[in-house]
Every structure is written in structure tokens, then in C-alpha cells.
Image (tube, rainbow, N blue to C red):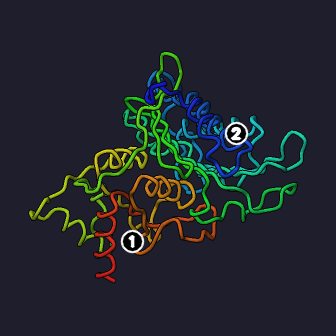
Amino acid sequence: MEERNKTLGEFIIENQKAHQYSSGELSKIINSIRLAAKVVNYKVNKAGLVDIVGAAGDQNIQGEDQQKLDVYANEVFIQTLINREIVCGIASEENDDFITVEGLDKSHNNKYVVLMDPLDGSSNIDVNVSVGTIFSVYKRVSPLGTPVTLEDFLQPGTAQVAAGYVVYGTSTMLVYTTGHGVNGFTLNPAIGTFYLSHPNMRFPESGNIYSVNEGNYIQFPQGVKDYIKYCQAEEEDRPYTSRYIGSLVSDFHRNMIKGGIYIYPTSSKAPKGKLRLLYECNPMAFIAEQAGGKSSDGFGRTMEIVPTELHQRVPFFCGVKSMVEKAEEFMEQAK
């Protein structure tokens, strides 16, 4: 079969033997995410036709207004994962605490936990800009047969066994890694099947795009200000192009294909940064590294940060390896 005509289901079956844990549970998790993504994609695509856009009237644990589609996507992904009897716990950006999944026989014998941002960039829904889902999978560290614990979720990104994202855009794509490279699958909406469209995705060796909310420039650390000035200087292959969508999945996806760096630093308004280590930064860092890119908090590797809380925020520099390293140089010099 030609590589590009391969469906996601076929790809999962073929690659299952490459997984360290060959019981098939990891494959079932990816299949569950595939199913939930198709359901959410349908709702996202018709959001302009029905009263599902706009705020739901509640705030999530972050204190942000929850969009109606946020709530819907959260429920769809949680229920799909629970119904498949494959995970022992779920943590979502939208929920205060993690969810314990005991299983049908109440045995607590499932091996994996899933962490997710069910609808990243949801404030863009009302204006028809791409949004996405981000997910991360870990093997539990607590004993089988016992309820899942907080420690199962507070693992460094280096312990991830799978991570990925879905971008709901002009076409809907599911991009994921299990530590054996990064592959992208595009949904054919006519038949509801994901096809392998972007095998072995890689960041370019160099890039000319920087993605940062320059409206916050005055609040940025000096190292970030210096790097932005470097990007804007008329020297060598610069100035770079500024592209910022405000939807992490969309910005990351573009930068991986075109070549760029995404930065969400600390600021006087967000002294720890804004992005969440467990739901956004770690999964994107795993994908970036598997695609030949790099991810950092400005000084060290994102995936080596040891989490201390479920909704922890960190500064985030991610993209083409040489660009992230250059940004780190400016951060170090300004210390």
C-alpha cells in the first residue's frame, strides 16, 4: 500500500509492535482520541450555525471564561476515554482535579493516564480561526490495582509515552508521536477517515518566523526583548517574519512545517508564564524533539522540569532548534 494512502487505523496496527508496551492499550488510546476528534471536529465546523459558540458562564480552574465548545470538547474526550476502558486517570485543563477511572470491574488495573487541553485557542472560535486539541500520555507510577494518584500525573515530560495534537482548520489534522518520529494524518470529511498525509514530519534546519504576542513587549524579560530586536534586525537572513495566531496548536503546526520559533515568556502580567506545563508545553515539547526541534523554558529543557502541581505554568520557547538556542543565548546574557 502506498504510504500516503494509509489510514490512521492501519498505521496504528502496523506500528503497534514498535511500542515498548505491546498490550495494545496505547493503540486503543490513540484510537479513542481519533474518534473523539472526529466528533469535536463536526461540532467545531458547524459552530457558526448553532448556539454552541460563546462563553458558557463558568470559569475553569485557570480563572478563564469557558467557551461552550470547551465544555463540550472536554466532555467528549473524557467520556470517550472512559468508555473504552483503557485509562486509569484523566487530567484536563478544564477540570480542577484529576479524574479517577476505576474500570468496569473496579479493578484499577489500567496502565495509562491522559492529560489534555481539549480545545486550545477556543477564544478564536467566534472569529473562525483554527483551534486544536492537545494530549499527552504517561504510564502510571502507582501500583496496578490501586486508584490513580497525583504522582501519576506529576511526571516530567521525559516520561511521556505518547503526545499529539489535533488542529481543526481548513483541513483537520491529527499529529502525534509515540517516541518514533512524528506523523500527521488529515481527515477526509466525506468518509470520516484520517489518512497519513505528512509522514515523518521534521522541523527545517533553519527558520524565519517568530511567533510571540508583541503587544506584551513592554512586560517581557530583557532577554526576550533582545531576541525580538535580533529577529527584526536587517542583517544576514533577517529580519524574520512575525506570525502570531494566538492558538498554540496553529502556531506550532505552522512553525514545524515552515520553520519558526514560538515564544510565550514570563511577563509582569504572567510572572510564571501563561501556558500549562502538563497540558500544553510537555506534549508540544515531545513532538518538537521527535521532529528535530527544541523546547525550553528559556534556560533549560522543558521536558526535564519536574512538575509540582497539576495546573503549573511555565515560560515556553519552542521550534527550530537553532532558533531556540539563539533565544536561550539572549536569555542567558540578560540574566
Image location (x, y in percent) of residue 132? 47, 41
Observer-nearest of 53 and 334: 334
Q: Are marks 1 and 2 in contact (CB under 8 Å)?
A: no
Foreground of the two, 57 or 156: 156
| Disc sitting over residue 96 in the figure | none
Q: Label 2: state its secondary structure.
A: helix
Q: Is residue 27 above or below residue 156?
A: above
Judge whether 199 appears above or below 140 on screen.
above
Residue on which the image places disc 1: 298
Residue 81 - label: 2
- Inspect the image, locate mark 2, and give the three-letter code of the amino acid beneath it: Leu
36 w.r.t. 149: above or below:
above
Is 242 placed left or right of 305 in the picture?
Answer: left
Q: Measured from the top left, where is residue 302 in percent x and y?
A: 48, 66
Q: Residue at x 50, y 23 (%)?
A: 50
Residue at horizontal 25%, vertical 69%?
227
Secondary structure state at the residue bearing disc 1: loop
Q: Residue at x 83, y 61 (%)?
A: 143
Provide residue 97's location: percent of width, then percent of height: 70, 56
Query: Quick check: 97 left or right of 223?
Result: right
Measuring 35% from the left and 51% from the top, which residue is drawn there?
203
Residue most extreme to the top: 190
Q: Earlier in the sequence, mark 1 or mark 2?
A: 2
Q: How far is disc 1 from disc 2 in space, using C-alphas? A: 34 Å
* Amino acid type, callout 1: Gly
Q: Residues within 10 Å of mark 1 (few under 14, many from 20)?
A: many
Classify mark 2: residues with Cα within 10 Å, few (<14), some (14-19) or many (20+): many
Which sits in the foreground, 290 or 259? 290
Viewport quadrant of the C terminus: bottom left
Residue 190 percent across, percent down from the top left: 48, 16
